Image (spheres, helix red, strand yellow):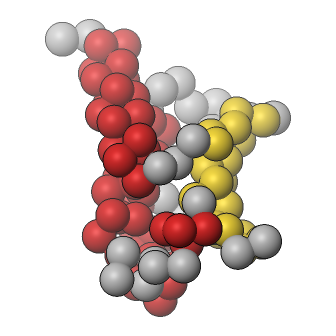
Amino acid sequence: ISEEIIYYMYEEWFQHEADILGIKNIKYINNNVEIEVPQSISDTIDGEKLFLQIYSINPKFRIKYSNKKLYISLNIFNRKGDYVKDILDLILLLKDCIK
């Protein structure tokens, strides 16, 4: 199986998991992927657990809390499609961190 197909499968899995969590706003801006976690999920996240585990997925993740929502971004400069696996792992971690 080619890398492109693997990245595509990860992206489809990511979209499915994001839909389950109600994550609709995913922005690709200036070599960054930014995920807006809705307030309904942000309010129920175990922030300490998320903060401690997110950097084991990728130390380049950045977390911001604004207007009662979590914003998580990842710099994808010079990365082909392998960042999709990190984003998928992030979504699975978010599901695990819901109280």
Q: Determine if residue 41 is in view.
A: yes
Image location (x, y in percent) of residue 40 = 53, 68
Q: Is residue 33 left or right of residue 1?
A: right
Quarter holding the N terminus?
top left
Image location (x, y in percent) of residue 19 = 41, 41
Please give the name of the residue rendered at 48% of the width and 59% of the height, measured from the top-left corner.
58
Please give the name of the residue rendered at 46% of the width and 78% of the height, measured from the top-left corner.
45
Q: Determine if residue 14 is in view.
A: no
Please give the name of the residue rendered at 43% of the width and 84% of the height, measured from the top-left corner.
46
Query: Relative to 84, does residue 98 appear above or below in the rendering?
Result: below
Query: Relative to 51, does residue 38 appear above or below in the rendering?
Result: above
Image location (x, y in percent) of residue 89 = 35, 53
Query: Relative to 99, does residue 15 appear above or below in the rendering?
Result: above
Q: Is residue 21 left or right of residue 80?
A: left
Q: Residue furthest left?
A: 1
Q: Is residue 60 left or right of residue 1?
A: right
Quarter holding the C terminus?
bottom left
In this rendering, the count of numbered labels is 0
Q: Residue furthest front?
A: 40
Of 66 and 93, the residue lying toward us: 66
Of 93 and 81, the residue lying toward us: 93
Q: Quadrant of residue 27?
A: top right
Image location (x, y in percent) of residue 83 = 48, 38
Q: Is residue 62 left or right of residue 19?
A: right
Please give the name of the residue rendered at 67% of the width and 61% of the height, measured from the top-left corner.
71
Query: Relative to 44, does residue 40 appear above or below in the rendering?
Result: above
